């Protein structure tokens, strides 16, 4: 018997007020896959992952996680989630190592003391994102890209089976994007599964096993990575902008 899907959404729908955001959504993520969710601004791609995790309610349909209906799922330590770009420090004078170590709380529990396995997990996570030399530095002293890598390391420290990332490389420097791509490759090699929302793939493209394109609230494509056309195919085109009214719809739009 084949292993159950890590994540499955069956006929999912999300409505904000009276406005449908996602309609009749069907998505299945198998163990070991790296699935990229692509789409233009307002297409619903970030809402998709938030609905999968229960952060926004479904108006219809069902989500299952590791074969268990989400309403009954309790093993949240198996999922590492990094939301859209947030400051890793959050105004708290914490070190990089302290922020990453907080990712162990779900796995070990709040009242249990830190053990050697926790320390190894933090070290491995810092190594994965290339921040071992910054462990004792204040998070506030890091660049935006390094702060994003800190948040990814925090998720990795929990040793999840599924990593869910919402635009993890948007607006970060090239070195951080390369470091993240390496960390993702190692995570999948170790048996992990990844679902990520992407603005553009860049160094992540060789790691992606499948692309899902969300357009106007529905899945318009599920398969190989589609390649941009027209002015979006120009390597000098600046993707980080909202589309002007005269622009044609593109899956390579901004968030």
Image (spheres, rainbow, N blue to C red):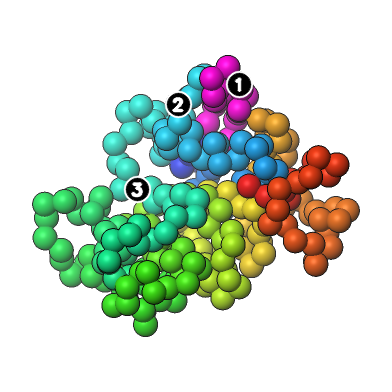
Q: Residues within 10 Å of mark 2 (few under 14, many from 20)?
A: some
Density class for disc 1 (Cα within 10 Å; few <14, some 14-19, many ≥20) is few
Q: Which residue is mark 3?
A: 78
Using the numbered discs, state the Cα–Cα distance from disc 2 to disc 1 in whole angstroms: 14 Å
Frontmost of labels 1 and 3 is: 1
Task: Please tell me whether residue 167 belongs to the stretch shown in magenta.
Answer: no
Which residue in the structure is indicated by mark 2? 57
Element class at badge 1: strand
Q: What distance separates the C-alpha of mark 3 from that of mark 2? A: 21 Å
2 or 1: tag closer to the N-terminus: 1
Q: Earlier in the sequence, mark 1 or mark 3?
A: 1
Residue located 72% across and 57% down the image: 239
Residue holding disc 1: 19
Magenta-highlighted residues: 9-27
Q: How many marks?
A: 3
Is residue 128 toward the left or the right of residue 20 in the image?
A: left
Q: Quadrant of residue 137?
A: bottom left
Mark 3 and 2 residues: CB-CB less than 8 Å, in contact? no
Q: Residue at x 32, y 73 (%)?
A: 138
Residue that lies at the very extreme toward the bottom in this rendered image? 133
Residue drawn where x is 54% and y is 36% of the image: 47
Q: Main secondary structure of the magenta part?
A: strand
Query: Is 199 left, or right, of 48 in this rendering?
Result: right
């Amino acid at each position: 018997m084949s292993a159950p899907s890590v994540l499955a959404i069956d006929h999912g729908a999300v409505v904000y007020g009276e406005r449908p955001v996602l309609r009749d959504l069907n998505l299945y993520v198998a163990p070991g896959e790296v699935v990229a969710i692509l789409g233009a601004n307002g297409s619903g791609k970030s809402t998709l992952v938030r609905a999968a995790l229960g952060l926004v309610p479904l108006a219809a349909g069902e989500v299952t996680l590791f074969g268990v209906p989400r309403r009954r799922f309790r093993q949240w330590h198996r999922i590492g989630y990094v939301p859209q770009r947030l400051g890793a420090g959050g105004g708290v004078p914490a070190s990089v190592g302290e922020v990453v170590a907080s990712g162990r709380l779900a796995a070990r529990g709040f009242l249990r003391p830190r053990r050697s396995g926790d320390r190894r997990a933090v070290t491995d996570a810092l190594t994965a994102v290339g921040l071992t030399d910054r462990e004792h530095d204040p998070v506030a002293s890091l660049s935006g890209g390094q702060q994003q890598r800190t948040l990814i390391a925090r998720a990795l420290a929990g040793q999840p089976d599924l990593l869910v990332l919402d635009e993890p490389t948007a607006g970060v420097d090239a070195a951080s994007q390369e470091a993240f791509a390496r960390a993702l490759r190692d995570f999948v090699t170790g048996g992990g599964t990844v679902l990520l929302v992407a603005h553009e793939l860049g160094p992540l493209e060789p790691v992606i096993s499948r692309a899902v394109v969300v357009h106007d609230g529905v899945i318009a494509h599920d398969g190989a990575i589609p390649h941009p056309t027209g002015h979006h195919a120009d390597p000098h085109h600046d993707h980080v902008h909202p589309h002007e009214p005269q622009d044609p719809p593109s899956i390579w739009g901004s968030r």
